Amino acid sequence: MGACTSKPPTEPQAPLQLHPDLDSASRVMNIPVKVKEPNRIPETPVPAVITTPAKQINTTPVPTEAPEESLESIQVIVRIRPSEKQLSVVIKPPNSITITPPERAGPGNSPNPTKDAAIDYNNFDRVMDDCTTNEEFFNVTLSKVLHRCLSGENVTVMAYGQTGSGKTHTMVGYNEDPGLLSRGVSKLFNLLSEKLDVTVTITLTVLEIYGEEVHDLLAANSQAPIRLVEQNGSTTPVGVMECAVTSEIAANDAVTAAIAKRTVASTNMNATSSRSHVIVNFNIVTTTHSAANSTAPPTRKIANLAFVDLAGSERIGKTGTKHSSQTGKEGVQINMGLLSLSKVIKAFNESPNHIPYRDSKLTRVLKQSFGGNAVTLFVSNITLDPCNYHETLSTLRYSSMASNVVNKVVKNEDEVTKLHRQFAELKVLSKKMARDLDVLSPRRLKHVKKEELKALLGTGSVRSPARSPRARKLSPPKTPKSTKNLVDPSKSPKKSMSPLVEVDMNAVKVDLQILNKMNEMNEQLPITRNERADM
Ligand SMILES: Nc1ncnc2c1ncn2[C@@H]1O[C@H](COP(=O)(O)OP(=O)(O)OP(=O)(O)O)[C@@H](O)[C@H]1O
């Protein structure tokens, strides 16, 4: 550790910022506002709304199957911030870290009770050491899952850890080394530029959770509290500004301007400490048209890409603030919000029947990312400075528990696409049903040749079903005469069949029941007689 060229941060770097129009003076505390060129990573000027001529469009029929649901654990990636003093650690790539406790855990901390007992964590998805650049970090994390947004899957990336551990550095970054946000936006637009058969619309919302208040950072009055409502199992903010973004530049500018309104303050632990949680949401609607059938409805997938930069947990004593000060009160509120998040994570491990999402605004807003419908990347930011030993252990403990949370990821489609899909499904089913019923109808059975029936029944020889002991055995006790001699198809081995009798045996079983019912009602008995006559 520590052999890399990146230096421990002595001077706080200027955060990635700031839009010239920023309206942050009233919210930013104790730090001067610096106006810089908005950060941009290499640009590909791609319009967000891409409409292609019909001839270039690929054939995409209406999907006839329900979207699959995949169960996926939250991916936890530990990132270590450079620091001058280092705890003794062993990192075993790619995913394990062992920490040896210091003799004393540092000023203000109690003596270490488990002296010399190294603590081993090996259930992370990845551990990235303090030499890792933002670019490398992006390449092994978000970059690998971003494409899933284009097929309608929600993706959340969130940074968690104590104050000053590098969450904003990871998420937002700096002009020279942009973070996951602008790298993610850049890659998203690059991916879209490669998709020629779709129309895409992207809208942006930016929320701040400050204490127990939710603010809309895109609104002119970003301090007006926003109400949350529960809708279809997830929490929706009411009346937030949605900004349509049509290019990478527009998206980055809008995000930079919004983040500049976030509340920050200077503490002993971090000169630009975030006093609120920020959630940047991109709502991505991808519409695919069918070139083969111009009357076919387009299919529409909807995904949410969320970047969550949490405020850091802090010990009021260490931050050098007073409980009664504004910064001290904010610290208490931040800790309370994070406590509710750790309770949610803990509940998945200890009492999964009740997950206390409703305990705070933070956990309500993040509900889909914990146990819900999202591919979640959980970045666990830590420092190895011995004086932060207990905080680092706590972060690792909760991160380890977070890796046990399983989400149900679905390819989201809009209501119209869903209805069309269900209608197409019904059509296929009803056709199949009609075909199966027709195969079993007395009229068709009369003409089924012996060989074909042999193949259908999967038997070496065809006997009169009435005389077959096997058939008798399989007949249900109260089967009406008319159908009791038909062999239960589920008991027959499935063999290849002639086209005439190409039929799903399970479907036949169901159809048999229907036939029985029909025969019961009509008191018709010709099937057995006809079969016997033919055989
Ligand atoms: N990987 C890193 N390499 C170099 N410097 C870093 C790294 N991570 C963090 N820093 C520096 O450490 C300081 C604190 O980082 P940052 O503001 O990202 O912490 P934070 O976890 O967001 O803190 P808070 O919760 O208080 O907002 C900043 O000056 C930042 O530049």
Image (cartoon, rainbow, N blue to C red):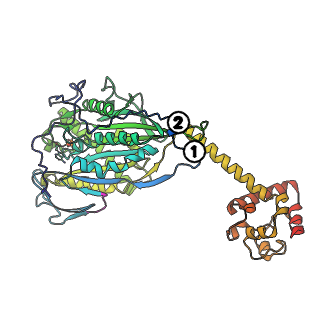
State the residue at coordinates (12%, 48%).
8
- Which image quarter holds the C terminus? bottom right
| Residues rendered magenta in the picture | 121-125
- Of tags 2 and 1, the one toward the viewer is 2
Q: Main secondary structure of the magenta part?
A: loop
Q: Is residue 292 left or right of residue 91?
A: right
For badge 2, the amino acid type reads: Ala
Mark 1 residue element: loop
Q: Find residue 181 and report its horizontal and vertical position in percent.
A: 29, 40
Is disc 2 surrounded by few (<14), some (14 to 19) or many (20+) residues within 10 Å? few
Q: Looking at this view, is 320 or 259 the one in front? A: 259
Residue indicated by mark 2: 54
Q: Find residue 347 and report its horizontal and vertical position in percent.
A: 38, 53
Magenta segment includes 112: no
Mark 2 residue element: helix
Q: Looking at this view, is 320 or 5 the one in front? A: 5
Is disc 1 surrounded by few (<14), some (14 to 19) or many (20+) residues within 10 Å? some
Quarter assignment of residue 444: bottom right
Q: Name the disc covering residue 61, or none.
A: 1
Q: Residue furthest front?
A: 55
Q: Find residue 440 and report its horizontal and vertical position in percent.
A: 79, 59
**Tag 2–tag 1 contact (CB < 8 Å):** no
In three-dimensional space, the C-alpha distance between marks 2 and 1, rounded to whole angstroms, equals 15 Å
